[in-house]
Image (spheres, helix red, strand yellow):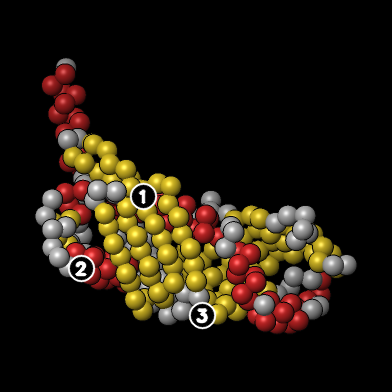
Amino acid sequence: MLRLVCIFIVLVTCCTTLKMPSSFKKCNLRSSDFDECLSNAIQDAIQQLKEPLPEYGLPKLEPYEAPKEAILEFGNETIGIRQKYFNVKVKGYTKIEKTSASFSLEHKRLNLNITFANVRYESDFEARGRLIFLPIDASTKIAINLKRPTFQIVFNLVEYEKGNLKYFRARDGSSHMEMEKATFDFKNIFKKGCLDGELSEMMNENWENITAYFQKTFPKFWISVYERKFNKFLEKVPVSELFDGL
């Protein structure tokens, strides 16, 4: 009986363990240009995801559709408006201008800085509350455009064993975003569309203050999304397949 259990475990492990995708570049941890190689490899891999790799749990990135359960809600008494973003679609993730990456095997930390040409967020949007003296009760679609945003992402990795192989899992990550400019397209926020043009114009003129406000919530939302997708890949590909030189 014990032998049958062992055979079953080996079979399950073999069936769920994958080699690195053949089109993905592997880098040698012992090489002096490892970080440069890793930067190029990550950028190339992301740009390949115009189509998904479902066997690796990697989604299509152009456009990227956030999971249905990924819902962002925030607001407070100071703002006076409760906001909800859902059915989020992102365009521009494969249009990368520059990638800088570093990885520490000792500290098990992956640092990424990725600059995109432009990124556009499209989302269903609900808002409830008041803006000065105007009531808001909106269900609409909005868009946010970022010019040359740089995403700074840190993945902290923990190592574990499965079927005598070592794997990584990402957790407790962080992210930050900087950009040259942001523009907003918020329509049908007020009844009969009044002040829509004025609202978007006001937001665009004050984009730095608005994005600073979003920075309090958006990074936590997106790092949770990124980690879930990254872990889908990491749970299928053992550490020995991620790098050469181990």
Residue drawn at x 46%, y 79% as measured from the top left: 148
The image shows residue 25 at horizontal and vertical percentages of 19, 65
Residue indicated by mark 3: 180
Give the secondary structure at mark 2. helix
**First in residue order: circle 1 vs circle 2:** 2
Secondary element type, mark 1 = strand
| Local crowd size for mark 1, using a 10 Å CA cut-off: few (<14), some (14–19), many (≥20) | some
The alpha-carbon separation of the residues under discs 3 and 1 comes to 28 Å
| Residue 98, image quadrant | bottom left
Amino acid bearing label 3:
Glu
Report crowding for label 3: few under 14, some 14 to 19, many 20 or more residues within 10 A (C-alpha).
few
Residue at far right of view: 133
- State how far apart marks 1 and 2 are (Cα): 20 Å
176 relative to 235 in the view: left or right:
right
Give the residue drawn at x 79%, y 71%: 190
For disc 2, the marked residue is 37
Left/right placement of residue 121 relative to residue 137 reads: left
Q: Position of residue 175 (x, y in %)?
A: 46, 59
Kindly check if marks 3 and 2 are in contact, taking CB atoms under 8 A apart as contact: no
Q: Residue 156 got which mark? A: 1
**For residue 174, above or below residue 190:** above
